[in-house]
Image: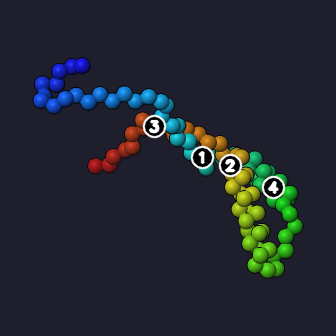
Amino acid sequence: MEPSLSDHRHILFTLRGLAPVLRIRNPRGINWGSFQGSLREKLERGPEMSMKDEVGLGLAICWIQQALVSAFEDNCPLRPIRKGRKSLRWT
């Protein structure tokens, strides 16, 4: 250890392990043609639902939401966040 010329004692921390890699989905990088095809396929495979009452309408909304999320996740891959990029500061 290097002397600090202080009357306080040194505290030494040793960190081990890997830092978690943060990943995000960037909608700008989605393959829209593939997304539309995947969504169409998922919606066509869906069950027949009657939307004449609240229960049937709720199930249809849930099915469409799951199809949209699934098609998005299939066609927009997770990518690591790039760090070290400085933001512009306007003064």
Q: Which residue is mark 1?
A: 25
Q: Position of residue 1 (x, y in %)?
A: 24, 19
Q: Residue furthest top?
A: 1
Looking at marks 1 and 2 on the same chain, the residue that comes earlier in the sequence is marked by 1
Give the mark nearest the N terminus, 2 or 4.
4
Mark 1 → mark 4, Cα distance in angstroms = 21 Å
Compared to residue 20, the image places residue 72 above or below, namely below
The residue that label 3 is drawn on is 83
Q: Is residue 86 above or below residue 61?
A: above
Residue 64 position (above or below residue 90): below
Q: Earlier in the sequence, mark 3 or mark 1?
A: 1
For badge 2, the amino acid type reads Glu
Please name the residue shown 83% across and 53% down the image.
Answer: 41
At horizontal 86% and vertical 57% (from top left) the residue drawn is: 45
Give me the C-alpha separation between circle 4 and circle 3.
36 Å
**Residue displayed at 77% across by 75% down:** 55
Foreground residue, 9 or 5?
A: 9
Q: Which residue is mark 2?
A: 73
Q: Do labels 2 and 3 touch, CB within 8 Å?
A: no
Identify whether 44 is placed above or below 4: below
Residue 42's label in the rendered image is 4
Q: Earlier in the sequence, mark 1 or mark 4?
A: 1
Residue drawn at (55%, 38%) of the image: 80
Mark 2 element type: helix
Position in image of residue 54 (x %, y %):
75, 78
Image position, residue 35 (x, y; %): 73, 50
Helix, strand, or loop for circle 3? loop
Tell me which numbered mark, 2 or 3, is placed earlier along the sequence: 2
